[in-house]
Image (cartoon, helix red, strand yellow):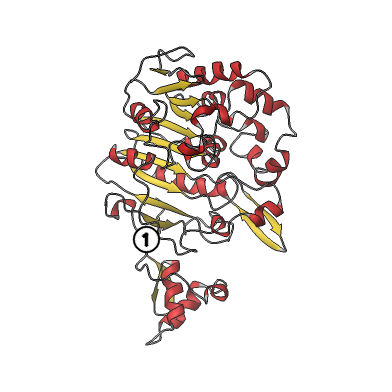
């Protein structure tokens, strides 16, 4: 069984290390050679801690640990670098990581993929925030806790082990290639990061366990691109959450037949997808959709995909309403609403309702009768009212059996 190397941040005080640049080229053993001194330099000590290595007689070792060696504390997280998987790296070239909150007393697992869009060319990549290209350890971000008023809090309340995959590869978790940018070889290795996580989880998840794979925006699309990997994890029950990343049949057909749409984006960050997660299909066929779930034998999901996110339809909007409602009925849960819900006063970011479950400004707040938290938790706990559809002025709430573009009963 592959061992997972664990690095626990020991101090919140290491907010800046001026020596980090030139030490990047030092090997672990070179650092440990200095640690044999009676009083090693402070910047060397800091780098040793940052890399999560131990030194014995001038030779580097790393401390390994099981996921279940971690203490379970409500709302507290642990950053775990993927040192054992050299191809799992961020754009910066440093080891990617997972962020954990482990509840050893339960057999439920939730893997969550972070969003954050993706560039379509070198200029867009260079304009991308520097922090989106680094690991949390690189930027000395301990991420001690997470917003309780989001899907995180609901999953923890339901006793799920939480495994968070940051999006530090700028490729919607889907690349396996390098690009040369300003003379520097930059890795886009999101697919390798996902492969590492699936490998690790396969050592822990038992056939009697339950698994939820969730993502928002780019993370939701990343689930679609890597569905072949996630679907291979053997669990009693596997469910998916696509928060702002889905295609109806009409959208799927459009994007399949219009190869120029977002083509530079596909070529730039998804050039590996056609030979990896999508089983030799072109990238346009890889987005999350009902067809994609069925292709890999999956059937249960919760989707948020709103009219304001309606980007690819080639016909009138009534077809979108019909198809998204049919999709939500088929998978058992989700939310789709009209533009009146996507106001700045509700989202506080002007995104028009994009991302409802991972957004703490939206998740537990009621608007026009919709409370995303209540609908999601109904689905999570196999209760009624797990689908909410409202495209006009009338409120619509329905069970999976009743879901349709028709007035429904309030929860």
- Please state the horizontal and vertical placement of residue 3, each as a whole percent of the image: 40, 55
SS for callout 1: loop
Which residue is outermost to the right?
A: 260
Q: Is 93 drawn above or below residue 197 in the view shown?
A: below
- Residue 180 in the image, given as x and y percentages of width and height: 71, 58
280 or 268, which lies in front? Answer: 268
Q: Nearer the viewer, residue 31 or 72?
A: 72
Residue reaching furthest bottom? Answer: 38
| Image vertical order of residue 381 relative to residue 220, above or below | above
Q: In the image shown, does 290 or 328 lie closer to the viewer?
A: 328
Residue at label 1? 64
Q: Residues within 10 Å of mark 1 (few under 14, many from 20)?
A: some
Q: Quadrant of the C terminus?
A: top left
On the picture, is 176 further left or further right than 368?
Answer: right
Q: Is residue 269 left or right of residue 168?
A: right
302 is higher (above) or lower (below) than 399: below
């Amino acid at each position: 069984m592959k061992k997972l190397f664990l690095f626990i941040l020991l101090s919140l005080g290491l907010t800046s290390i001026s020596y980090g640049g030139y030490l990047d080229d030092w090997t672990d053993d070179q650092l440990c050679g200095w640690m044999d001194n009676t009083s090693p330099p402070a910047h060397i000590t800091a780098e040793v801690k940052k890399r999560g290595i131990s030194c014995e007689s001038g030779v580097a070792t790393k401390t390994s640990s099981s996921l279940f060696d971690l203490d379970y504390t409500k709302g507290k997280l642990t950053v775990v670098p993927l040192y054992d998987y050299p191809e799992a790296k961020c754009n910066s070239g440093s080891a990617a990581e997972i962020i954990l909150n482990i509840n050893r007393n339960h057999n439920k697992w939730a893997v969550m993929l972070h969003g954050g869009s993706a560039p379509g060319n070198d200029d867009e990549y260079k304009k991308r925030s520097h922090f989106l290209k680094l690991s949390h350890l690189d930027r000395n971000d301990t991420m001690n806790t997470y917003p309780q008023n989001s899907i995180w809090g609901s999953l923890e309340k339901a006793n799920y082990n939480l495994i968070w995959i940051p999006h530090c590869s700028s490729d919607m978790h889907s690349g396996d290639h390098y690009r040369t940018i300003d003379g520097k070889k930059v890795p886009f290795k999101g697919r390798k990061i996902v492969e590492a996580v699936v490998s690790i989880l396969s050592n822990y998840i038992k056939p009697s366990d339950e698994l939820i794979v969730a993502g928002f925006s780019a993370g939701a699309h990343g689930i679609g691109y890597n569905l072949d990997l996630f679907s291979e994890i053997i669990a009693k029950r596997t469910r998916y959450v696509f928060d702002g990343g889905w295609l109806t049949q009409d959208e799927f057909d459009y994007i399949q037949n219009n190869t120029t749409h977002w083509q530079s984006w596909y070529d730039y960050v998804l050039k590996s997808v056609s030979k990896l997660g999508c089983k030799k299909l072109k990238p346009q066929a890889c987005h999350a959709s009902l067809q994609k779930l069925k292709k890999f034998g999956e059937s249960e999901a919760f989707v948020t995909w709103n009219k304001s996110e309606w980007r690819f339809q080639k016909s009138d909007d009534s077809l979108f309403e019909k198809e998204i409602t049919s999709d939500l009925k088929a998978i058992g849960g989700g939310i789709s609403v009209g533009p009146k819900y996507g106001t700045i006063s509700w989202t506080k970011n002007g995104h028009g309702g994009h991302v409802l479950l991972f957004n703490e400004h939206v998740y537990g707040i009621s608007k026009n009768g919709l409370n995303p938290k209540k609908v999601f938790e109904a689905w999570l706990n196999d209760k009624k009212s797990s689908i909410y559809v409202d495209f006009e002025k009338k409120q619509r709430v329905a069970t999976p059996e009743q879901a349709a573009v028709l007035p429904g009963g309030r929860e």
